[in-house]
Image: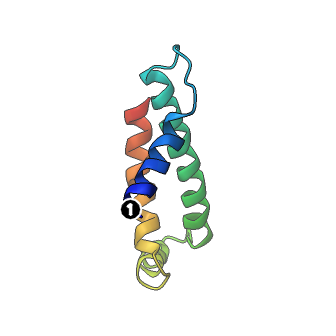
């Protein structure tokens, strides 16, 4: 069963034709697009819970990290995604 699944997946991925012009710049462009979309989505979620008041901005960040499910993961994706955008540029 496992061998059949591996052979099925291998034949599925190898059956698509690929143009000869595709090089590493296509892959970097795709990764850049994915990270920009990730930045927009996580930025919207972070912006929904952020308060810009000088006294409560720091506490709103900790509220997002501690009280919202996987808030720490969204913040980590947003901060590391910004680094990857500049890396892929």
Of the 4 image quadrants, the one containing the N terminus is bottom left
Query: Which residue is nearer to you in this view: 75 or 4?
Result: 4
Quick one: which residue is furthest to the top in this view?
A: 21
Q: Is residue 50 above or below residue 42?
A: below
Instruction: Kindly identify which residue carries mark 1.
Output: 2
The reply, left or right, for residue 34 in relation to residue 10 is right
Give how far across and how far down residue 68 sits, in percent. Answer: 50, 81
Q: Is residue 63 above or below residue 36?
A: below
Give how far across and how far down residue 12 sits, in percent. Answer: 53, 43
Query: Which residue is nearer to you in this view: 56 or 24?
Result: 24
Query: Which residue is nearer to you in this view: 77 or 1?
Result: 1
Question: Residue placed at 43% from the left, 46% from the top?
Answer: 82
Question: Residue placed at 42% from the left, 23% from the top?
Answer: 24
Numbered disc 1: secondary structure: helix
Q: Is residue 55 above or below residue 8?
A: below
Of the 4 image quadrants, the one containing the C terminus is top left
Question: Residue placed at 45% from the left, 43% from the top?
Answer: 10
Query: Which residue is nearer to you in this view: 86 or 22?
Result: 22
Q: Is residue 14 above or below residue 55?
A: above
| Crowding at mark 1 (Cα within 10 Å: few <14, some 14-19, many 20+) | few
Q: How is the image coloured?
A: rainbow
Quick one: which residue is furthest to the bottom in this view?
A: 67
Give how far across and how far down residue 85 sits, in percent. Answer: 44, 39
Give how far across and how far down residue 7 sits, in percent. Answer: 43, 48
How many marks on residues? 1
Question: Residue placed at 56% from the left, 18% from the top?
Answer: 19
Q: In terms of image quadrants, where is residue 50?
A: bottom right
């Amino acid at each position: 069963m496992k061998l059949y699944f591996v052979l099925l997946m291998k034949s599925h991925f190898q059956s698509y034709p690929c143009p000869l012009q595709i090089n590493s710049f296509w892959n970097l462009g795709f990764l850049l697009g994915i990270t920009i979309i990730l930045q927009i989505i996580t930025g919207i979620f972070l912006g929904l819970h952020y308060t810009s008041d000088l006294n409560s901005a720091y506490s709103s960040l900790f509220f997002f990290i501690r009280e919202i499910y996987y808030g720490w993961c969204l913040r980590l994706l947003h901060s590391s995604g910004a680094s990857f955008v500049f890396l892929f540029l």
